[in-house]
Amino acid sequence: MTDAQTFAKAIAERHRNRERFTLEAPPGRAGDMAFGYDVQDALVPLLAQPGEAVAGYKIGLTTPRMQQMCAIDEPIVGAVLSRRMHVSPARVAMGGYVRLGVESEIAVRIGASFLGGQVAPEQALDHVDAICAAFELVDDSGADYGRLAAATLVADNAWNAGLVTGPTIAAAGIASLKDRKGVLFCDGEEIDTGSSSDVLGDPANALSWVVRHLARRGQALQPGQWVSTGSIVPTKFVASGQSYRFEVEGLPPVEVTIA
């Protein structure tokens, strides 16, 4: 068994026991992103139910505010398992998580494969058939951000705990996802705003980035899979009884209630 497989088993055990995020990477591995993704590749099958598919991917740390929050200066990616997909208006139970947060995003559904493992940002939306506002569900398991290492965050599947997709619009005719204001509401009160241009300058840049990243690891986006392009506003950790609504200019709103 490799170091990556051993570490993946330890992370999976922590998830089964719903324990805090306290594991640290093996000596010399804290900054080794390739090791982190090797662990993630070993972890995802351990988290999946028999026969469960990967429904898509989340891209994280795509804005300066999110990178500052986690003290990590590059985007990351994690897999979204099919049972963790929800459709707005969704209801999510707190009891299934250690510390649940919501991230307010734009998500896209892949309509056509990316040949050659790369795509220019200006052509990225040509491979998309649907677009929506979305909430990524994240579970940081009560991590100590002061001791957080990029490779360890990646290893733990970039903390993905699911994706809530809002009503979709057709991608055909959408020239750009830039400069779209996002507004987050909690229990009807506006609590934060952001711009889609904060996401690597354009969510299409995030999509182009993940296509290249997956190709380097021998993987590829498939038609029907979703990509959540990155949080427009920083993570909000939730409490039971709260309702969240995220509005993005030009898109129907997405809603989730925390039970």
Image (cartoon, rainbow, N blue to C red):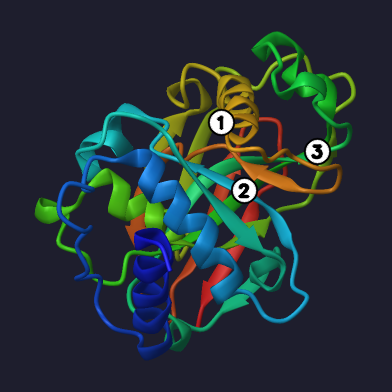
Judge left or right: residue 228 versus residue 70: right
Question: Residue beneath label 1, please?
Answer: 213
* Residue 185 in sight here: no
Residue name at image x 45 percent, y 36 percent: 232
Q: Mark 2 = which residue?
A: 57
Instruction: Identify the amino acid type marked 1.
Output: His
Crowding at mark 1 (Cα within 10 Å: few <14, some 14-19, many 20+): some
**Dot in front, 3 or 1:** 1
Q: Residue 7 appears at what percent x and percent y? A: 34, 67
Tally the marks: 3
Name the quadrant containing residue 65: top left
Crowding near the residue tagged with mark 2, few <14, some 14–19, many ≥20 C-alpha atoms within 10 Å: many
Who comes first in sequence, dot 3 or dot 1? Answer: 3
161 horizontally vs 109: left or right? left
Local packing at callout 3 (Cα closer than 10 Å; few below 14, some 14-19, many 20+) is many
In the rendered structure, which amino acid carries the disc numbered 2? Tyr
Front position among marks 1 and 2: 1
Q: Which residue is mark 3?
A: 110
